[in-house]
């Protein structure tokens, strides 16, 4: 499976759980390292960097994820639909997002 196909499956699964989710398309005006998927779920901003199994994020991607977390977002790297849905389950357990 390609990374693009995985991203599409993840966005579909996030939406099925009631999240607003969009694939972020990179371009010349976007800063480097922005995560692949932006999501809002139960009031929480969730940012996901999608990597195929055994692939690692770049240093700039890690930096951007850390910056997002410092700003209060839920953010991380996922390699499957199940990984992505675990982020929504995490939000479900945190009352401060509701």
Image (cartoon, rainbow, N blue to C red):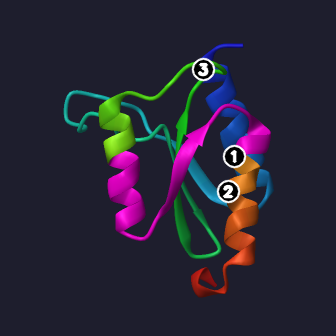
The one of 57 and 32 positioned closer to us in this rendering: 57
- Badge number at residue 9: none
Task: Report x, y in % for residue 84.
Answer: 69, 46
Q: Residue furthest top?
A: 1
User: Which marked residue is nearer to the observer: mark 2 or mark 3?
Assistant: 2
Q: Secondary structure at mark 2?
A: helix
Quarter containing the C terminus: bottom right
The image quadrant that residue 44 belongs to is: bottom right
The one of 27 and 85 positioned closer to us in this rendering: 85
Which residue position holds label 1?
84
**Label 3 environment density (alpha carbons within 10 Å; few <14, some 14–19, many ≥20):** few
Which residue position holds label 2?
87
User: Which stretch appears magenta?
Assistant: 64-83
Residue 76 falls left or right of residue 29: right
Which residue position holds label 3?
3
Q: Secondary structure at mark 3?
A: helix
Task: Give the residue at x 71% y 60%.
Answer: 88
Task: Give the residue at x 48% y 37%.
Answer: 36
Residue 1 falls left or right of residue 46: right
């Amino acid at each position: 499976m390609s990374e693009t196909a995985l991203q599409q499956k993840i966005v579909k699964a996030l939406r099925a759980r009631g999240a607003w989710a969009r694939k972020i398309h990179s371009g010349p005006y976007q800063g480097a390292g922005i995560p692949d998927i932006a999501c809002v779920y139960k009031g929480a901003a969730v940012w996901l960097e999608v990597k195929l199994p055994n692939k690692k994020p770049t240093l700039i991607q890690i930096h951007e994820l850390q910056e997002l977390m410092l700003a209060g977002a839920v953010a991380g790297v996922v390699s499957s639909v199940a990984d992505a849905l675990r982020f929504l389950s995490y939000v479900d357990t945190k009352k401060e997002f509701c």
